[in-house]
Image (cartoon, rainbow, N blue to C red):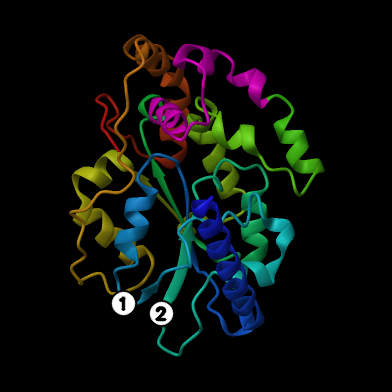
Amino acid sequence: MKKRIKFLIKKIIFTIRFNFRKLIGGRRMKPSFMIVGAQKAGTTSLYHYLIQHPSIKSALKKEVNYFDKNYYKGDSWYKAFFPIEKNDNSITGEATPFYMFHPLSMKRLAEYNPNFKIIVLLREPASRAISHYYHEVRNKREEQSMREAFENESKRLEGEWDNIKNNPKHDCYNLQRYSYKARGLYANQIKEILAHFNEDNLMVIDSKKFFKETQNTVKDVLEFLEVNSDLKIKTQKKFNIGTYTKDPDEKIILTELKEFYKEPNEKLFKMIGKRFDWDKNHKA
């Protein structure tokens, strides 16, 4: 009971503070960059590294989920998540990995700011799907075995695209939580980004390289964002690294997924004009 009372008090205080921020939304910074995916590919780590830079200001939270699930709440709601505008040439942005997969997000992003700098981290899709599954299990949103969850994915996602397009307030729960295999079909998602943004506004990063060569990758991102890239960023801490009880079928499912993604991966590499070394897995 006491915990619930504390939770309600915190919620009330946050609501009051947030509504105040909405009142001065006109004076707030407009985001100029967006980390749009992929989920379980290092977006949290990258965002926390970037906001160490004195010229990059943090949003109120990393994942705002405006251009996917909360678009109906309007511009004043979105503005409230960003810092007060100052004449110091600083920039701000957010990192919502569901944007890349949501069918309407890219169109909405382009309408809001056609010059957004779009950053995409791509993880080897088979290991990404398995990590995604464990993430949902850990958060008590998945009760099916790995085999069941992957076999039932299509059924769980049935009708989701139409529901999203027909109902602005649709919560996208199944699409966000149970899209284990579908999210790894990256070529279609990159194609959607390029349908709304110039190629020069898109940076695609192999998350395996990001975790292996973190300093160099962060430097490249800072250059892409056109801020001073000579500053040293602390990258020792990793974010959102989970520990899980392994599913007994994980090994064989991983092999099956790698076969499933062979052709889609080739399509991706052809589209972006480069190949990623995804033969070996990495943890993130």
Does 210 appear above or below 254? Answer: below
Q: Is residue 135 magenta?
A: yes
Q: Are marks 2 and 1 in contact (CB under 8 Å)?
A: yes
Instruction: Report if residue 34 is visible in the image.
Output: no
Pick the residue in front: 187 or 69: 69
Q: Which residue is mark 2?
A: 90
At 66% across and 39% down in the image, what residue appears?
172
> Identity of the amino acid at label 2?
Ser
Image spot of residue 243 (x, y percent): 29, 32
Q: Residue at x 77, y 36 (%)?
A: 163
Q: Local crowd at mark 1 within 10 Å, few (<14), some, or many (≥20)?
A: few
Of the numbered discs 2 and 1, the one sitting upstream in the chain is: 1
Which span of residues is magenta-colored? 129-157
Residues 60 and 101: in front is 60
The residue that disc 1 covers is: 54
Q: Is residue 216 left or right of residue 200?
A: left
SS at mark 2? Answer: loop
Please state which of residues 132 and 260 is positioned toward the viewer in this rendering: 132
